[in-house]
Image (spheres, rainbow, N blue to C red):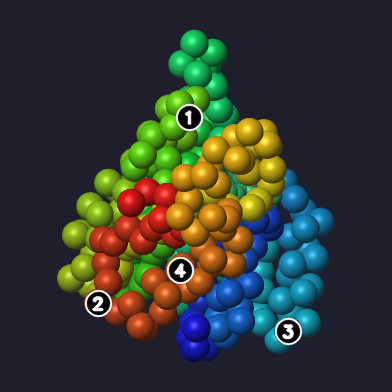
Amino acid sequence: MDVDLSEKTALVTGGTRGIGRAIVRALADAGARVAFTYRSSTEAAEALVDELEAGDTEALSLQGDVADFDTAQAHVDTVLDRWDTLDVLVNNAGITRDGLMLRLTEEDWDDVIDTNLKGVFNYAKAAYRPMMGQRSGSIVNISSVVGTSGNAGQTNYAASKSGIVGFSKSLARELGGRNVRVNVVAPGYVQTDMTDELSDDAREGILDAVPLDRLAEPEDVAQAVLYLAAPAAAYVTGHVLHVDGGLSM
Ligand code: NDP
């Protein structure tokens, strides 16, 4: 896809691995300055900044927990101090703590909701004001096929991911008048550290249900995010873009 994001600034949460890393790369390849957050992979973060700078991308890594409200505000402030604008926010960071209801603990519930759902609120809350002031901005939130179809053993994760859809549609209605767009990308199963934990049987079962007959690569998701971030999607808001090989239809 031929997308020009030069002179634009993007912030991606959870950019060190998997889907987030592919999103960072795609935004950089389109010419954007890119800041990304991570929780603990400092070496991976430093290596990614080096890689981006070697390709002439202005890059910034920011450590912290997305579940922490003040951290999100500090990260957005740092981006604005450095580059003055924030044009694209991608809320990607997410975790799983799977378990059937019988075994799911309160901590499993709180960890997933705080990271996956409150994390999205935290960064959107910090970013919406500068975007409204600019009269432009694109927020892309990463949900999951599990948010619409549900999955045994993932009540906490499914709740967080469907919560993202309701949150995003509501915020899209609030911010549309200021030309700030809010959309969702809902991936199916993607080849990352998160899905490396799947058993062979589970993987076979998923492939049987995916019309395109393969797991997604992180780049498949990154291209969908890039589209929603770009001027080509100027009239798209409140949308859920399924990138799941047909799994959810
Ligand atoms: P990974 O586990 O591969 O990477 C997660 C990234 O998020 C890492 O950069 C990690 O940082 C960061 N992160 C995790 N928790 C926090 C936190 N509390 N604060 C800050 N950063 C954090 O995940 P994926 O690439 O697989 O998934 C990315 C997103 O896509 C998630 O929201 C996930 O739910 C969603 N998704 C994934 C699918 C899949 O099949 N993989 C399918 C559908 C949706 P660090 O490296 O420091 O730990």
Measure how far apart labels 4 and 1 are at the Cα level.
25 Å
Give residue 54's position: percent from left, percent from top: 78, 82
Query: What residue is pinned by disc 2?
Result: 235
Residue at point 74%, 79% (across, down): 53
Of discs 4 and 2, which sits in the foreground? 4
Q: Nearer the viewer, residue 13 or 131?
A: 13
| Left or right, 122 with reference to 104 | left
Q: Secondary structure at mark 3?
A: loop
Residue linked to disc 1? 154
**In the displayed structure image, the side of residue 133 where residue 70 appears, left or right:** right
Q: Is residue 88 above or below residue 7?
A: above
77 left or right, relative to 137: right
Which one is closest to the eye, mark 3 or mark 1? 1
The amino acid at mark 1 is Gln
According to the image, label 3 marks what residue? 55
- Mark 4 Cα shell of 10 Å, populated few (<14), some (14-19), many (≥20): many
